[in-house]
Image (tube, rainbow, N blue to C red):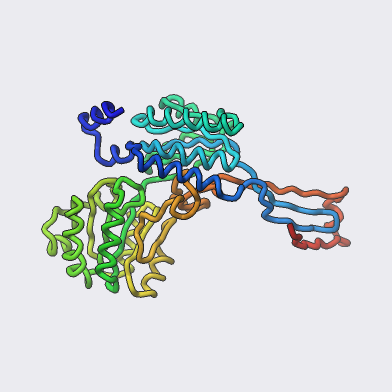
Amino acid sequence: MRQIVRQAQANGISASLYARLKLDETKLKGAISGVRDVSRLPDPIGDIQIHRELDEGLVLKRITCPLGVLGVIFEARPDAVVQISSLAVKSGNGVILKGGQEAIRSCEALVKAIHRGLTQAGIDPAIVQLLTTRQETLELLKLDQSVDLIIPRGSNSFVRFVQENTRIPVLGHAEGICHLYVDKAANVQKAVAIALDAKTQYPAACNAIETLLVHRTIASEFLLEAVVPLQMKNVELRGDQPTREILNIPAATETDWSTEYSDLILAIKIVDSLEDAIAHINTYGSRHTEAIATEDPQAATTFLAQVDAAGVYHNCSTRFADGFRYGFGAEVGISTQKMPPRGPVGLEGLVTYKYQLVGNGHIAATYAGTNAKSFSHRDLGE
């Protein structure tokens, strides 16, 4: 295995891809911890969401149930196999996994271990399947009679490709072009710490910031304070012209505002107002996670209300956008679409519900016409 890693590095694998592929002791322990957390969560199946008497002897229930079979196509993160499988099993779903080709050996080893664990627990291991070729992925997209949901995790172009080539419902996990806006009322030291964490704690993650927006009033003070710690973490800085009048860094281009680097690269732009920051985010962001650093409650309230993203944060790092950190145990991905589920998708995003209605010879005609009987619509206890 070490030889394979060394060969990959010798072949020029990018730092961001290497970070995603690496399955070291820390990642493995985190994945195992996530499985245990999922096991402790309440059973999401069979939950009675509505229990209502429509009329005497006519009782309605809405009860949660599994979606069925999930098809999850994800990028080069082998630890995702463990997260996704644990959530699928807990929610009563079968799952077909397709990882990145670069991580195929790790994925195969993990699925083998999962199958062994399922067998020991008395569960059919066939509920977790692994695909290994691109042709199998294309065939998966055609299984609209057998697969109930496709979850693609990757770039916007990849998600669009999946959406355009399947009739199966798609829950999109697209790229993360995340921002931190440093407001004129920000606490500089607090904002520097947030920016440093959001960019460098794990730059390959989709919830790391790619662009830093700074209010003109505070720009000089903040940037001169932030530049040293960022550069000490080997962050390559790029800036617009006002930023370059403060810092001696390369120029940012229009492309930088819409790029997910997944690396130690950060684009910086100075804005004239909160409104300009929000407009920039809503133009270039990917609706993933956005943050504001400010001590002005009204500015924070405006930002949280007007920024269009699955996660909007005040005075904290975007790196908190994660199912494990939200207490979901794990996640199958982070949905950047507007329709729910949105943001980190845990168990609740993998179940649906059905309506069960039990009567005693009731017919709809009784409740229609000039002498229609009224419904009672009385909510019942458990």
- Looking at the image, which residue is at 43% across and 42% down? 31
Using the image, determine if residue 64 lies above or below residue 13. Answer: below
**x and y, in percent, of residue 354 in the image:** 68, 46
x, y (%) of residue 104? 38, 28
Above or below, comparing residue 372 to residue 3 in the picture: below
In depth, the one of 46 and 62 nearer the eye is 46
**Direction from residue 58 to residue 1 in the image, left or right:** left
Quadrant housing the C terminus: bottom right
Above or below, comparing residue 29 to residue 220 in the picture: above
User: Residue visible at 47% across and 33% down?
Assistant: 97
Picture coordinates of residue 140 (x, y %)? 50, 29
Query: Toward which corner of the image does residue 81 lie, by quadrant?
Result: top left
Classify residue 247 by image quadrant: bottom left
User: In the figure, residue 318 lies in which quadrant?
Assistant: bottom left
Q: Is residue 144 visible?
A: no
Q: Is residue 169 left or right of residue 107?
A: right
- Choose between 224 and 216: the one closer to the eye: 224
Quarter of the rendering occupied by the N terminus: top left
| Horizontal side, residue 373 vs residue 258: left or right | right
Regarding residue 143, the answer to whether it shows in the image is yes
User: Is residue 254 or residue 291 the one in the foreground?
Assistant: 291
Q: Is residue 262 above or below residue 318?
A: above
